[in-house]
Structures are given as structure tokens and as C-alpha cells.
């Protein structure tokens, strides 16, 4: 008798968990907003935030799956990826991480340190839309580039609907 009671209780808990997941999935999705920076460098976060001058809200996350998935709510209008500290293993992890990104979200790779030509394979692997060398002296160009990418991809998504 006790095994049947235990099994019935386990089935009840499984159904309750499935129901909770289904309710979560049925919630309306939030519209895209802001820019998400994937970087471990806190100083870069401050530099990018000052470069955007409040044009879009900036959120930052390290290249780690848990925090990255949390940072995707609400989905970003643009994803910025920092190249500092990305070696072979980190590159593989980053590629897997970005598979969780919202479809249609443009990616802009910010190259910092090292040879810019060395980052071309990363840009190709990430299916990034653009790669620029981060230069704090060119903030107005960066701001226009961010705004242009967001507007262009926003129009594409609207036209696809």
C-alpha cells in the first residue's frame, strides 16, 4: 500500500510542476528593450554606458549561462560581445551561450586588445552582424552604429510579420 501512495504523491507533484512550467511559458513575452553587453570587464560596462548617453538602457552580464539567460528578460534590441579574455575554450562556450539569444537580435562584437584580424573567425562563428574595434574616442560613431543596427533589424522584423 505504501509504495502506491508514494507513487501517487510523486505523480501529483510532477503534474503540479508541469502545470507551473506551462503557466510560465504561457505568460506574454516582453517586448525587446535596451542593449545587452556580454563582458567580464566592469570598466567596459561604464564606458559603453557613457557612450550610449541614455539612448538605450544598458544591461551587462558575464559570459556564463545562468546570468545570461536571466539577462535575456526582456530580450535585448542589440547584443554586444566583448572579445577580451576569449581564448579557444571560452570561444566555444560563448558560441553555445549565444545559441540561447532571441532570434533576429543583431550581434555587434567589440574588439579590444590583440590583432583585429584574429577576431574574424569569432565574428563568423557567432554569426555577428558587425565587428568594430572599441575606441572610446569614437563614441559618436558607436552611438550612431548602435542606433542604426537597432532600427534596421527592427524594420526587418516588422516586415517579416
Image (cartoon, grey):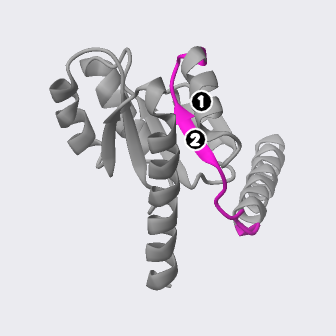
Relative to 5, residue 110 above or below: above
Residue 145 picture location, percent across and down: 44, 50
Residue 4 picture location, percent across and down: 78, 49
Mark nearest the camera among 2 and 1 is 2
Residue 109 picture location, percent across and down: 37, 37
Please say if the residues under marks 2 and 1 sit with CB atoms less than 8 Å apart: yes
Q: Which mark is residue 61?
A: 1
Q: Residue at x 41, y 26 (%)?
A: 135
Q: Secondary structure beneath disc 1?
A: strand
Between 158 and 69, the one nearer to me in the picture: 158
Instruction: State which quadrant residue 104 falls in.
Output: bottom left
Give the mark nearest the N terminus, 2 or 1: 2
Q: Mark yes or no: residue 96 visible.
A: yes
Is residue 129 rendered to the left or right of residue 68? left
Residue 100 picture location, percent across and down: 47, 48
Q: Does the magenta portion include 48?
A: no
Between 121 and 134, the one nearer to me in the picture: 134
Please state the extent of the stretch shown in magenta in the rendering.
26-42
Mark 1 Cα-neighbour bin, 10 Å: few <14, some 14–19, many ≥20? many
Between 52 and 22, the one nearer to me in the picture: 52
Relative to 86, residue 52 above or below: below
Q: Residue at x 76, y 42 (%)?
A: 3
Q: Which mark is residue 36?
A: 2
Predominant SS along the magenta part: loop
Amino acid at each position: 500500500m505504501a509504495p502506491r501512495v508514494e507513487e501517487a504523491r510523486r505523480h501529483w507533484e510532477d503534474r503540479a510542476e508541469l502545470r507551473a512550467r506551462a503557466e510560465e511559458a504561457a505568460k506574454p513575452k516582453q517586448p525587446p528593450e535596451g542593449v545587452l553587453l556580454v563582458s567580464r570587464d566592469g570598466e567596459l560596462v561604464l564606458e559603453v554606458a557613457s557612450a550610449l548617453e541614455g539612448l538605450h538602457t544598458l544591461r551587462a552580464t558575464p559570459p556564463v549561462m545562468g546570468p545570461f539567460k536571466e539577462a535575456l528578460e526582456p530580450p535585448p534590441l542589440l547584443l554586444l560581445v566583448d572579445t577580451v579574455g576569449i581564448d579557444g575554450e571560452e570561444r566555444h562556450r560563448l558560441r553555445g551561450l549565444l545559441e540561447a539569444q532571441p532570434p533576429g537580435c543583431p550581434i555587434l562584437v567589440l574588439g579590444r586588445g590583440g590583432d583585429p584580424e584574429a577576431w574574424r573567425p569569432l565574428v563568423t562563428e557567432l554569426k555577428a552582424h558587425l565587428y568594430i574595434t572599441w575606441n572610446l574616442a569614437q563614441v559618436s560613431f558607436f552611438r550612431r552604429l548602435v542606433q542604426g543596427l537597432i532600427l534596421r533589424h527592427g524594420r526587418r522584423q516588422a516586415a517579416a510579420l
